[in-house]
Image (cartoon, rainbow, N blue to C red):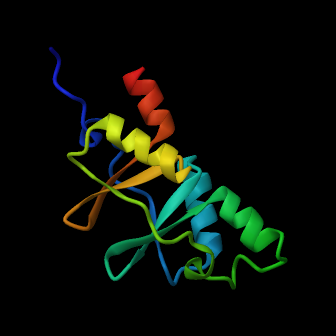
């Protein structure tokens, strides 16, 4: 029987991040540059939240805020749902479905080491 696939086997690393004190425009620029839909927000060296394209649209654009003056901490989604690197893929997928999220930051000892998305699971597992 084949060995169980773990989160660390298919995660993307390094993760594109912004600081909690960065302006939102910095998060937008990183998403565009790296062609991704979300960035992880770091505070004190630890993952603290996430900003998605949808967060920017709903919390900045629709509210008429300036992305150059609004800081990431003010629009990030918290609490951040994370998964340990040694978690089986199936368990991570169930967590994503339960929490209705498409991206899971991967941690080891609280430190951010990667990220896994629904697309990663579909592409590499199915």
Note whether 100 is above or below 48 in the view shown.
above
Q: Residue sitting at 55 percent across and 80 percent down?
A: 73
Q: Residue at x 58, y 67 (%)?
A: 27
Q: Residue furthest front?
A: 98
| Residue 24: image location, x then y, percent | 63, 74
Q: Pick the residue in front: 79 or 119.
A: 79
Q: How many labels were placed on the picture?
A: 0
The answer to whether residue 31 is above or below residue 61 is above
Taking the view exactly as shown, the residue that stands out farthest to the top is: 1
The x, y position of residue 4, in whole percent, is 21, 28
The quadrant holding residue 11 is top left
State the quadrant of the C terminus.
top left
Rendering coords of residue 31 (x, y %): 58, 56
The x, y position of residue 81, in whole percent, is 42, 61
User: Which residue is found at the position 55% from the left and 60% from the top?
Assistant: 30
Q: Quadrant of residue 84?
A: bottom left
Q: Observer-nearest residue: 88 or 31? A: 88
Q: Where is residue 91, by image quadrant?
A: top left
Q: Quadrant of the N terminus?
A: top left
Q: Is residue 58 above or below residue 4?
A: below
Q: Is residue 52 left or right of residue 117?
A: right
Asked if residue 82 is positioned above or below residue 5 in the image, the reply reads below
Q: Residue at the location (61% across, 62% down)?
A: 29
């Amino acid at each position: 029987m084949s060995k169980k696939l773990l989160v660390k086997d298919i995660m993307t690393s390094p993760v594109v991040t912004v600081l909690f004190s960065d302006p939102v425009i910095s998060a937008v620029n990183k998403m565009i540059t790296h062609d991704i839909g979300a960035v992880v927000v770091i505070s004190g060296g630890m993952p603290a939240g996430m900003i998605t394209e949808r967060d920017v649209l709903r919390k900045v654009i629709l509210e008429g805020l300036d992305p150059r003056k609004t800081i990431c901490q003010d629009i990030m989604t918290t609490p951040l749902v994370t998964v340990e690197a040694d978690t089986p893929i199936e368990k991570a997928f169930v967590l994503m479905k339960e929490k209705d999220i498409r991206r899971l930051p991967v941690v080891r000892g609280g430190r951010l080491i990667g990220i896994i998305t629904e697309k990663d699971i579909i592409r590499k597992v199915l």
